[in-house]
Image (tube, rainbow, N blue to C red):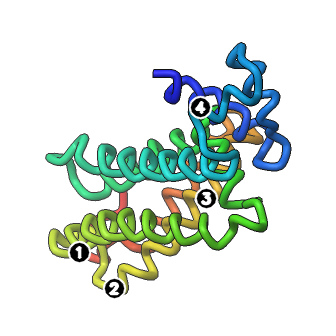
Amino acid sequence: MMKIKVKQEALKLFADKGYDGMSLSALAEKLGMKKPSLYNHIESKESLFLEIVDEVFCSYVEYVKESILLKSESNVEYRLKEVLTSTARFLSLKDQGMLYMRVLTFPPRHLQQSILGKFSAYEGETDSMLAELMEEGIAQQEIEPGDTTVYLQAFYVILDGISTEMHIYDAAAVEKKTEAAWFVFWKGIRSRGQVEK
């Protein structure tokens, strides 16, 4: 039980301060214990950080999966847009989203390769799910036949942009930008046989 509490508090501190700015002394103080007592629950700051990063990446994949399955009876356009907006919401979360963005943008140098390796593995899972959804769209003649890898790359760039904007602008501004980005993206991949709305 204490290990869970340690990770919860560490997540907040890592998200707020980054790896280098987070001290085990500050974590121990938050938990109401002395720093040496922390080592009853963790191996090291590095191992704690990597464990939390792994859990955040895993949560992200689950979030994407749930977004895809949520409206499985809906058309592909709706489901793909839902993945975009709900995943962007995940990335805007105060602790998990902030740590996710911070780790990928400014990873601790000595852990960079380890983090990128973990990220690649998890991104492979989301790639597969999203590519499958896009293939479904092609099969149902909602999406123009084409290279789903290219479609996926464009989708991620939009997602990354929206996620960043959520940390800068208010909700109304982000919603407006999201609608504009989605309009252009969908227009680009939509089946030529579809009637424009």
**Which x, y percent locates residue 115?**
60, 64
Q: In screen coordinates, is 24 left or right of 97?
A: right
**Residue 186: x percent and y percent?**
43, 64
Residue type at mark 2? Answer: Gly
Q: Residue at x 83, y 49 (%)?
A: 20
Are discs 4 and 3 less than 8 Å apart at CB? Answer: no
Q: Given the image, on which type of amino acid does mark 1 rest? A: Ile
Q: Which mark is residue 40?
A: 4
Going from the N terminus, do you reach mark 2 or mark 3 first?
Answer: 2
**Residue 177 visible in the snapshot:** no
Callout 2 touching callout 4 (CB < 8 Å): no
Q: Is residue 62 left or right of residue 2?
A: left
In the image, residue 138 above or below residue 72: below
Label 4 to label 3: alpha-carbon separation: 38 Å
Mark in the foreground, 2 or 4: 4
Q: CA distance from mark 2 to mark 1?
A: 8 Å
Look at the numbered discs 2 and 1 and tell me whether their residues touch, using CB distance below 8 Å: yes
Q: Quadrant of residue 188?
A: bottom left
Residue shown at 63% from the left, 48% from the top: 49
